[in-house]
Image (cartoon, grey):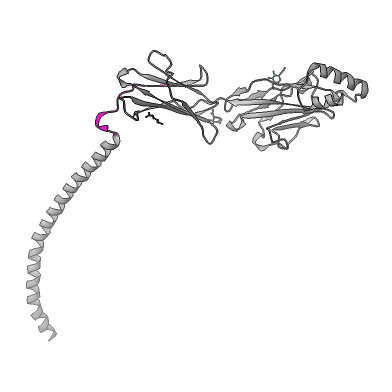
Amino acid sequence: MSRQLEKRRRGTMHSGVFMRVLILSVVTDPIPAQNSEIFTLVVPHGPILTRINASISLPCELSPIFSAEPLEVRWYRPGNFNRPALLYKDHSIQASVDPRYWGRVSLTGGLERGNVSLRLDRVTLEDRGEYVCRVSSEQWYEKASVSLTLIVLGGIPVLSLAEARGGGGQVNVTCSSVGWSPQPTLTWKNKEGAELRNVQEVLYTHDSQGLVSVSSWLLYSPSDSDWLSCTVSLSEEEEKESRILPRAPMDGHWSLGAFITTLIILLLVVFTVIGLFIWNKKTDKTESTERPEETALVRGDQSQAPNGGTVLL
Ligand SMILES: *[C@@H]1O[C@H](CO)[C@@H](O)[C@H](O)[C@H]1NC(C)=O
Ligand SMILES: *[C@@H]1O[C@H](CO)[C@@H](O)[C@H](O)[C@H]1NC(C)=O
Ligand SMILES: *[C@@H]1O[C@H](CO)[C@@H](O)[C@H](O)[C@H]1NC(C)=O
């Protein structure tokens, strides 16, 4: 029976074992108080969904229902047992917790009713992930995992056109969108709203904050001349769509860059011409004004030199 007890402490149980263990402990151990009870924890199966800045409850309840007030309740991220998000023991919430959760966590479900759910306020992106709910008495402990998923809507899909590699008269249409959580789906549709399934692949990348970027491309015949739509979505209500009319890339590739370059060269030519014209006029003017001065100076020198000589002598 002690082997079964060990097994129970480590993990799953079924009611048969539970009953036998309970009966055994009743028979063999004098039970000191209610906090020696053997219990399990009830948590949700799927993840809890929430949004940034929201308040959320991570459910965790004792089964059978009895007061958790004399017990220890520890909520921690896996690997952070000694730095819990919340620690309740000796009938009060302890101060020594992870600073990331300061002032944002509480137990509001009613400990006396066995509800040890963690309330988390002002949810941030970093709050995403697993949480362990661990409840222990002097004789017993149980833990269970609750997962928190953040819903973040990303940006409007950006559609761009390029000439298809290898030509063939098709255009390469690319759709990309950044900043999603959790991983979204991407679908291409034609004007009729029918999904296009000949898409090569959908690529996912994670940014430094752990948000997901998605992109996909397909080849389209511009002769179809109907618009295409690209939808990125988390669910039917949480989606963003963009549309494009895929046309063949313009002849001569008269891009904005080429236009600006041409404009700059044109302006340079114009300024050079104006500059040369002004310079020419200026040199003309100085030549015509300098010549008489020069002759006057020469004449003055000639007349002054003998004068100076007479004064000195
Ligand atoms: C969260 O709240 C803060 C302060 O109230 C605000 O500045 C920020 O924009 C909010 N973020 C979102 C995603 O709602
Ligand atoms: C436990 O408490 C949470 C609030 O933290 C509440 O949402 C939940 O409904 C409670 N469960 C029961 C069974 O009362
Ligand atoms: C289409 O464009 C994407 C980039 O947006 C590129 O990775 C892909 O190789 C292109 N495919 C063809 C056939 O041109």
Nearest the viewer among 234 and 124 is: 234
93 horizontally vs 127: left or right: right
Residue 176 among magenta residues: no
> Is residue 295 visible to the viewer in this orientation of the structure?
yes
Residue at image coords 60%, 25%: 149
> Is residue 69 visible to the viewer in this orientation of the structure?
no
Q: Position of residue 228 (x, y in %)?
A: 38, 19
Nearest the viewer among 256 and 288 is: 256
Q: Position of residue 108 (x, y in %)?
A: 71, 24
Q: What is the quadrant of the N terminus in the image? A: top right
Q: What is the quadrant of the C terminus in the image? A: bottom left
* Ligand 3 in which quarter: top left
Nearest the viewer among 86 and 64 is: 64
Residue at image coords 66%, 34%: 101
Q: Quadrant of residue 145?
A: top right
Q: Quadrant of residue 116?
A: top right
Q: Quadrant of residue 113?
A: top right
Nearest the viewer among 209 and 89 is: 209
How many numbered discs sit on the rendered protein?
Answer: 0
149 horizontally vs 270: left or right: right
Q: State the residue lying farthest toward the bottom.
A: 313
Q: Which residues are magenta?
A: 242-255
Q: State the residue lying farthest toward the top.
A: 192
Q: Position of residue 191 (x, y in %)?
A: 37, 15
Residue 248 among magenta residues: yes
285 horizontally vs 48: left or right: left
Q: Position of residue 72 (x, y in %)?
A: 79, 30
